[in-house]
Amino acid sequence: TGYEEEMFGFDVIVGNPPYVNITQIEKGNLSYFEKTYSSAKYGRYDLYVLFIEKSLKIIKKNWITSLIIPDKICYQKYGTNIRKIILENAFINELLDCSNIKIFDQAVVDNIILTISKKKNIWNTNLKVIQKSFDDFIETNINQNIFFKFENYTRRTKITNETLKIIDKIEIKSISLKEICYISFGMQPWKLEKFVFNSIKNSERLNEHISS
C-alpha cells in the first residue's frame, strides 16, 4: 500500500513500537526491510522507524496515528528518510517533547509523542515541550514546512517563530562552517552516571585524594 490509498485501513493508530537497533536484527529481515521501507535505506536505523512508516501507510486518509518513540527520531541521521516522508505525506498535528520527564522507568531513552494525520499540511504544527509534568508545558505553533530548511529535516521542538527570524538574519549575513571545514563529534557519553562507577561522595576522602 502507498501513502495515497484510502479505501482500506485504520481510523486511528496508537502505539509504543519496539526500540530495536538493526545490529540486533537478523540479516534476512534487514534485506526485507530495505526492500519494503524507504526509511530503512539510511544508516543504522532503529525498528521503531519502520513502524512509523507502516502506520502512515495503513491509516485512512485524514485520520490519525500517534506513537510514543525516542526523541532521537528528531535529530539522528538514520531518521532522515522518515522525517522527509512525514513532511511530504502527512500533517504533524502535535510533537510532544517529553525529554524533561521520565516516561518509562526501565528505558534509557528520552521520548516524544508524535501525532500525525494522513493529509496535506493545512495549518500550523503544535510543538509542546513538557517541563515537570504533563500539565506544565511550553507551547509553540509553527508551519511544519520550516523543517524542510533544516539539514536532514531535523525537528527542533524548542524552536519558536521569534527564533526562526533570528536564524534567518544570521544565515543571510553569515558563512556556514560546513562550507569551509568538516565538523565531527568526538566521543559523547550520553548518561554520565552510567560511565562513572567510583564516585567519591565523602568530601574528606576527596580532599585526601587531592592532597596526595
Image: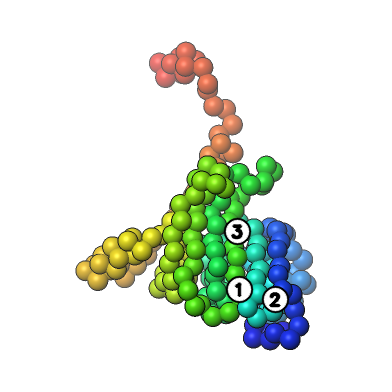
Q: Earlier in the sequence, mark 2 or mark 1?
A: 2
Q: Which residue is mark 3?
A: 113
Locate residue 46 relative to residue 79 in the image: left or right: right
Q: What x and y, as percent, mark residue 191?
A: 55, 42
User: Is label 2 in contact with label 1 (beta carbons under 8 Å)?
Assistant: no
In-front residue for pair 175/60: 60
Q: Residues within 10 Å of mark 2 (few under 14, many from 20)?
A: many
Q: Which residue is mark 2?
A: 59
Amino acid carrying label 1: it is Ser
Locate residue 65 relative to residue 187 in the image: left or right: right
Q: Which residue is rendered at x = 49% and y = 67% of the image?
A: 125
Q: Which residue is mark 1?
A: 117
Q: What x and y, as percent, mark residue 41?
A: 61, 75
Element marked by disc 3? strand
Element marked by disc 1? strand
Task: Name the mark on residue 155.
Answer: none
Amino acid carrying label 2: it is Ile
Q: Residues within 10 Å of mark 3 (few under 14, many from 20)?
A: some
Count numbered badges in the picture. 3
In-front residue for pair 77/57: 57
In-front residue for pair 73/159: 159
* Residue 19 visible in this rendered orientation of the protein: yes
Q: Which residue is rendered at x = 69% and y = 79% of the image?
A: 60
